[in-house]
């Protein structure tokens, strides 16, 4: 780093360092070892993209993969879905999400992106998952969903009404 005062390339000493520009850069006060002059540098940091999740009640929280995994683990309890498949599903969902959204994403959009993938993996886990995130929105939707699935599957282990409601 070249001193803007004396043009020396000798090392400068950092005397103060603080985040600026909303955390997107670090502002450093430096003292030149050659001329003792003080100058400021801004270093832009490559931060991983952070999405904010907007919940039903309009509250906001940073996206947390752990919450997605926990929800999936509950839905996949005693189902033939491995922990590895759950992590892969979450990663795949995140990739799409982070491409599609810039700053904020509604919780329901995450749930739907997860459900869409879970459906291909295990139908019982899918219905369990869907029953959690859809129940407060529209119960009729879920009933239709289950009816539709029952018509389309001969799986004797398929979800029964008693287990769901
Ligand atoms: Zn200097």
Image: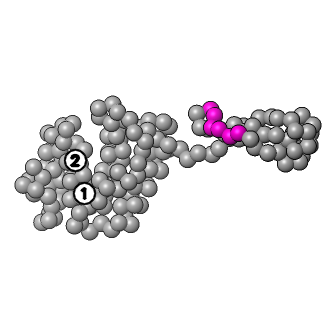
- Mark 1 in CB contact with mark 2 (< 8 angstroms): yes
Ligand 1 closer than 8 Å to label 1 CB: no
Specify the label residue 75 is tagged with. 1
Q: Which residue sits at x=36%, y=44%?
A: 110
Q: Is residue 1 visible?
A: no
Answer left or right for 35 relative to 94.
Answer: right
55 or 95: nearer the eye? 55
The 10 Å Cα crowd at callout 2, few under 14, some 14 to 19, many 20 or more, is: some
Magenta span includes 17: yes
Q: Is residue 110 visible?
A: yes
Q: Which residue is mark 2?
A: 132
Q: Which residue sits at x=89%, y=34%?
A: 5
For the stretch drawn in magenta, the main secondary structure is strand
> Which secondary structure, mark 1?
helix
- The quadrant of the rendering that contains the N terminus is top right
142 or 94: nearer the eye? 94
> Which secondary structure, mark 2?
helix
């Amino acid at each position: 780093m070249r001193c803007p005062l004396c043009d020396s390339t000798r090392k400068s000493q950092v005397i103060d360092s603080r985040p600026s520009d909303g955390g997107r850069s670090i502002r450093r006060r430096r003292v030149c070892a050659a001329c003792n002059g003080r100058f400021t540098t801004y270093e832009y940091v490559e931060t991983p993209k952070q999405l904010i999740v907007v919940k039903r009640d309009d509250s906001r929280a940073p996206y947390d993969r752990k919450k997605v995994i926990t929800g999936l683990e509950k839905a996949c309890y005693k189902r033939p879905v491995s922990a590895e498949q759950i992590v892969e599903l979450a990663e795949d969902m995140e990739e799409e999400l982070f491409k599609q959204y810039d700053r904020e994403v509604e919780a329901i959009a995450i749930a739907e992106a997860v459900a869409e993938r879970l459906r291909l993996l295990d139908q019982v886990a899918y219905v369990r998952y869907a029953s959690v995130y859809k129940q407060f929105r529209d119960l009729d939707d879920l009933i239709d969903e289950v009816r539709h699935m029952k018509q389309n599957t001969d799986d004797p282990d398929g979800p029964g009404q008693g287990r769901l409601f």
